[in-house]
Amino acid sequence: MKAFLTLLLDSFRMLKSGAIFWVTFGISLLVAVIYLSIGFDEKGVTLFFGLTGFPSEDLVKGSPGAATFYTKAIVGFWLSWAAIILALISCASIFPKTMEEGSAGMLLTKKSSRLGVFIAKYIGSLLFMFVQVGLFIVIVLIAMKWRLGF
């Protein structure tokens, strides 16, 4: 079990130490802040915390269209398509980096099977994505409570 936890921690550290972590983390944070900046008033949609906006009869404050737009159109697109693509890009290097010189030597010193190494690396990449998606979801929930009241 200790070898498994060591491999799990190693895979998370490997992903976190690369620049791709900070790039994908920054993109997720930027999208979450932009999402947080979208609001609704009596005229329509406001952007960038009320700095600008555009009139729309269907997307006024308190309308069902505004809630649908805010919950399904934006969050549905980001979490179903864009976040998956970011996850694939950022976690695709975990197995090739494991077989590089130095990393493979560390794996050989531990008593674990190939399946154990594979599972530890897989769970490490899931933990890596959980950190990013978790931050995005927390900001989205704050935005939904603030903008829509639920």
Image: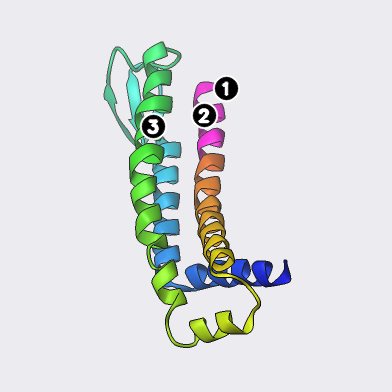
What's the distance in space between the residues labelled 1 and 2, CA to CA? 6 Å
The residue located at (33%, 20%) in the rendering is 44
Mark 1 or mark 2, earlier in chain:
2
Label 1 with label 3: CB-CB less than 8 Å: no
The Cα atoms of the two marked residues, 1 and 3, are separated by 17 Å
Q: Earlier in the sequence, mark 3 or mark 2?
A: 3
Work out whether residue 100 or residue 71 is closer to the camera in this orientation and state it.
100
**Magenta region:** 140-150
Can residue 58 be spotted in the picture?
Answer: yes
Which of the two residues, 110 or 27, is positioned nearer the viewer here? Answer: 110
The amino acid marked with disc number 1 is Phe
Circle on res. 144: 2
- For the residue marked with disc 3, what is the amino acid? Gly
The quadrant of the rendering that contains the N terminus is bottom right
In the image, 110: left or right of 81? right
User: Which residue of the protein is positioned furthest toward the right in this rendering?
Assistant: 2
Residue 66 included in the magenta stretch of the image: no
Report which residue position mark 1 lands on. 150
Q: Secondary structure at mark 1?
A: loop
Q: Which mark is residue 76?
A: 3
Q: Report the front residue among 122 and 24.
A: 122
Local crowd at mark 2 within 10 Å, few (<14), some, or many (≥20)? Answer: some
Q: Secondary structure at mark 2?
A: helix
Query: What element does badge 3 sit on?
Result: helix
Tell me which numbered mark, 1 or 3, is placed earlier along the sequence.
Answer: 3
Q: Residue 122: x, y in percent? A: 51, 59
Residue type marked 2: Met
- Taking the spot 44% from the left edge, 87% from the top edge, the residue there is 101
* Mark 1 touches mark 2? (CB < 8 Å): yes
- Residue 109: image x %, image y %? 62, 84
Which of the 4 image quadrants contains residue 53? Answer: top left
Vertical side of 7 occupied by 37: above or below: above
